Image (cartoon, grey):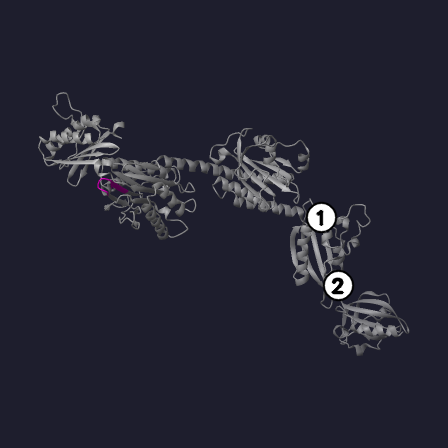
């Protein structure tokens, strides 16, 4: 009895969950109630204790309440009524059987019923998983049986009982890698109380580790009535198909974004391999292309003897297996794969254990197809427009689900897009090589060597077709052992710019043959560019991206005279060269660049300076100084330092050019780079003989005698007869038409040069004399006796010259 009395007292402290508790004795009187009645009915416990419970009923006929469970109207203190949900529970009391009555506002009762219904429905679900874990993350309740989870073999005793998972943990269900990730998320929820909503992760079962399985997890922390954390509730659903579809779309998007952005074939191949491995589609990937594709050629049909090159590889751990071909290797496709490549069909081998258990593979085949760690293999041809470009080979290790038909279809879709990108890059490579080949064909030999100078020219094409174009340099032999150094550039890029550059180079060579001074030559070239601009078609009439144009081209023209040891140059918008004499600091030549060609009609100011023996000149274009590893001024200072050191040490121009390019070009330039390095060497004094004669016909014989004597000293008597004839004709004409003292000079270089100077500004003209003419055959005779001849203006008149090869005896 006392125990019952104590239990009744404890009812005052029981949580009422929004309701009130009344204890009614066997006589129907209220003997105890909770404080909640004050809020529900407006009455205090003191008001109710000792009163019949029937006084509270709006319908007193409802008494007695034994077994009542439902909605009733109760009276409030103010006489109004309110609907309440009543629950009664029989109770033994000292006077007989009493009741415990729980009254709850109707709206709260409905909500509690909904909550209970929801929990019952969740735990009865078989498509939506619901688990409750204790704070140590062991399972206390689960709505799915082990059989439904896939963790128990069918037929075991506990394969249909959800209660059989009590005390288990996530590690008992999922493979270690997936279990570790899931536990980390649940631990975070348990520690922080922050819910986790719709977190999707791989959830491969221990019973089927090779089957892909994705689950969506939502978790929240559970608390007791007094707010103490008691566990973590987890709702999980199988979203494998939806996850696979999202992953497929994501992979396709990633492939579309990365593949095809570049127009370099190796880059496209590398991006293809990388995206498939980085996104987890394959453990290893290799892209093999026919060698013709790498060269930009039109791909042909793949056959047994077609050479493939492994262009790109990627591995999940960053280490490529040494037992198979690495990147850069060249091989023939094995017979196991060649037929599939030729037919353009893929090859799928979900399991390689059967392959390994079969006939032993040829070592060459294994080097292409079979890495040791691979457990699954997929081959996809890379084809565009019906032509095979190469293959995509994919492998998966044992830790990943083997390739299936869906994977093969997805790989083929990605490969088809990649093949279009590769074919575009191949065409671009072909165009790039065409432009570069044209550009190189229009340039002179890289190294030239004469008695006057040794030169080394370098042309570094841009890394893309957009950059390849009209940069050029040239070394032009002039009369009297002189040389002309030319460097320039055409605005624009591509085939049009290269062709325009060829036109300008030809024009400069033609004007150079006229022996014009640098400033005058550039003025004539400027006029030519203006005329070309007048006749060029408008942009809309020219196929391609841009019309060919020479307007805005730059050019620097420099003439070196080894006999005088002097240079003269002028510039049309081109940067001045760097000059380095032995033993002194290198300096930039103080030449004022005029406007680019065809832009303005201003004159081009020449500058002349002396060239000590062994001096070096470096001509360059601006892209050599416009690189990301320093300002143009810093890079120019580095160039000057290299030239100063090499000029003093006597380094060859070839080595100096290589040093400058290695130091100043960290990678492929955005625009063509040209560099021309020249080391000057004057002719020795004994290679020149000079005379001056008065304007008297009697000196012609003296001139012949002097020439004969000089040729004897040079051991060139085999040239005495033609040289005397040339001398006689030139001196005679100079005396007849010049009317002033005549200069005569012999130069022994690679050729024998005979020069005659006079004060006349009238240029000689070669013509064919008639049979009746008494004269007019002098120049015709000179042209027959010499390998080439010409004339040039000087400050005091003109000079006519003729060259003869020395022959073996004169060398």
Q: Which residue is mark 1?
A: 205
Q: Place residue 553 in its image quadrant.
A: top left
The magenta stretch is 557-565
- 261 over 300 or under it: above or below: below
Based on the picture, tell me whether residue 561 belongs to the magenta stretch: yes
Q: Which residue corresponds to the image point at 40% horizontal and 47% vertical from the top-left? A: 663
Q: Which residue is mark 2?
A: 112
Q: Secondary structure beneath disc 1?
A: loop
Residue density around tag 2, few if under 14, some if 14–19, many if 20 or more, within 10 Å? few
Q: Nearer the viewer, residue 127 or 348?
A: 348
The alpha-carbon separation of the residues under discs 1 and 2 comes to: 37 Å
The location of residue 186, given as percent across then percent down, is: 68, 58
The location of residue 598, given as percent across then percent down, is: 28, 43
- Lower position in the chain sequence, tag 1 or tag 2: 2
Q: Secondary structure beneath disc 2?
A: helix
Asked if residue 47 lies left or right of residue 246, the reply is right
Q: Place residue 673 in its image quadrant.
A: top left
Indicate which disc residue 94 carries. Answer: none
Asked if residue 333 lies left or right of residue 493, the reply is right
Q: How many marks?
A: 2
Position of the C terminus by quadrant = top left
- 322 over 731 or under it: above or below: below
Residue 490 appears in the figure: no
- 494 over 802 or under it: above or below: below
Residue farthest along the bottom direction in this orientation: 46
Residue density around tag 1, few if under 14, some if 14–19, many if 20 or more, within 10 Å? many
Residue 246 appears in the figure: yes
Q: Place residue 762 in its image quadrant.
A: top left
Position of the N terminus by quadrant = bottom right
The location of residue 585, given as percent across then percent down, is: 30, 51
Q: Nearer the viewer, residue 712 or 112?
A: 712
The location of residue 21, given as percent across then percent down, is: 80, 71
């Amino acid at each position: 009895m006392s125990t019952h009395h104590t239990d009744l007292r404890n009812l005052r402290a029981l949580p009422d969950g929004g309701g009130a508790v009344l204890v009614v004795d066997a006589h129907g009187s209220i003997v105890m109630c909770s404080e909640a009645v004050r809020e529900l009915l407006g009455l205090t416990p003191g008001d109710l204790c000792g009163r019949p419970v029937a006084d509270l009923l709006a319908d007193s006929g409802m008494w007695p309440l034994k077994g009542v469970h439902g909605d009733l109207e109760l009276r409030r203190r103010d006489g109004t009524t309110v609907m309440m949900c009543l629950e009664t529970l029989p109770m033994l009391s000292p006077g007989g059987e009493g009741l415990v009555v729980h009254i709850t506002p109707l709206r709260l009762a409905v909500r509690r019923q909904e909550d209970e219904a929801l929990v019952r429905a969740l735990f009865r679900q078989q498509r939506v998983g619901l688990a409750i874990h204790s704070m140590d993350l062991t399972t206390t309740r689960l709505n799915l049986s082990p059989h439904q989870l896939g963790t128990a073999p069918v037929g075991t005793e506990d394969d249909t009982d959800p209660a059989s998972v009590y005390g288990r943990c996530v590690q008992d269900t999922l493979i270690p890698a997936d279990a570790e990730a899931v536990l980390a998320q649940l631990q975070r929820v348990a520690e922080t109380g922050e819910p986790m909503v719709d977190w999707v992760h791989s959830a491969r079962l221990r019973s089927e580790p090779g089957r892909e399985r994705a689950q969506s997890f939502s978790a929240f922390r559970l608390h007791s009535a007094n707010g103490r954390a008691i566990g973590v509730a987890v709702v999980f659903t199988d979203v494998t198909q939806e996850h696979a579809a999202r992953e497929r779309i994501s992979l396709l998007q990633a492939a579309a974004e990365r593949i095809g952005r570049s127009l370099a074939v190796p880059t496209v191949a590398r991006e293809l391999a990388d995206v498939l491995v980085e996104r987890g589609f394959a453990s290893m990937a290799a892209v093999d292309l026919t060698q013709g594709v790498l060269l930009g050629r039109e791909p042909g049909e793949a056959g047994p003897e077609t050479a493939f090159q492994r262009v790109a590889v990627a591995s999940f751990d960053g280490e490529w297996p040494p037992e198979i071909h690495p990147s850069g290797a060249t091989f023939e496709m094995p017979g196991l794969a060649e037929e599939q490549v030729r037919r353009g069909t893929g090859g799928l081998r979900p399991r390689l254990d059967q392959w390994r258990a079969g006939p032993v593979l040829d070592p060459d085949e294994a080097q292409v197809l079979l890495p040791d760690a691979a457990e699954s293999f997929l081959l996809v041809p890379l084809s565009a427009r019906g032509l095979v470009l190469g293959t995509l080979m994919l492998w998966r290790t044992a830790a990943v689900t083997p390739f299936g038909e869906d994977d093969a279809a997805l790989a083929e879709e990605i490969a088809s897009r990649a093949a279009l990108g590769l074919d575009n890059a191949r065409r671009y490579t072909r165009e790039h090589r065409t432009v570069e080949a044209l550009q190189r064909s229009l340039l002179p030999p890289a190294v030239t060597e004469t008695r006057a100078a040794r030169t080394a020219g370098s042309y570094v094409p841009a890394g893309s077709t957009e950059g390849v174009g009209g940069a050029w340099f040239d070394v032009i032999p002039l009369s009297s052992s002189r040389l002309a150094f030319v460097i320039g550039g055409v605005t624009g890029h591509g085939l049009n710019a290269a062709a325009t550059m060829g036109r300008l180079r030809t024009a400069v060579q033609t004007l150079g043959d006229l022996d014009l001074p640098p400033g005058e030559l550039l003025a004539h070239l400027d006029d030519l560019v203006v005329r070309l601009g007048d006749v060029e078609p408008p942009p809309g009439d020219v196929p391609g991206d841009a019309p060919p144009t020479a307007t805005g081209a730059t050019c620097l023209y420099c003439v070196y005279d080894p006999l005088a040891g002097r240079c003269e140059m002028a510039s049309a918008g081109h940067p001045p060269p760097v000059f380095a004499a032995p033993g002194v600091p290198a300096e930039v030549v103080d030449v004022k660049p005029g406007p680019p060609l065809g832009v303005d009609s201003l004159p081009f100011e020449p500058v002349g300076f002396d060239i000590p023996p062994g001096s070096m000149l470096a001509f360059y274009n601006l892209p050599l100084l416009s690189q990301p590893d320093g300002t143009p001024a810093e890079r120019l200072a580095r160039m000057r330092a290299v030239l100063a050191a090499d000029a003093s040490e006597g380094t060859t121009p070839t080595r100096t050019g290589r040093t400058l390019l290695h130091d100043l070009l960290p990678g492929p330039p955005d625009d063509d780079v040209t560099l021309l390095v020249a080391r000057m060497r004057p002719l020795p004094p004994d290679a020149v003989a000079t005379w001056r004669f008065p304007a008297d016909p009697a000196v012609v014989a003296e001139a012949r005698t002097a020439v004969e004597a000089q040729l004897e000293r040079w051991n060139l008597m085999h040239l005495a007869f033609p040289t005397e004839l040339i001398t006689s004709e030139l001196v005679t004409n100079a005396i007849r038409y010049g009317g002033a003292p005549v200069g005569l000079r012999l130069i022994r270089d690679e050729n024998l040069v005979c020069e005659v100077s006079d004060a006349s500004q009238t240029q000689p003209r070669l013509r064919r004399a008639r049979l009746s003419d008494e004269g007019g055959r002098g120049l015709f005779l000179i042209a027959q006796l010499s390998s080439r001849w010409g004339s040039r203006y000087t400050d005091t008149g003109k000079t006519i010259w003729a060259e003869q090869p020395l022959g073996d005896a004169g060398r």
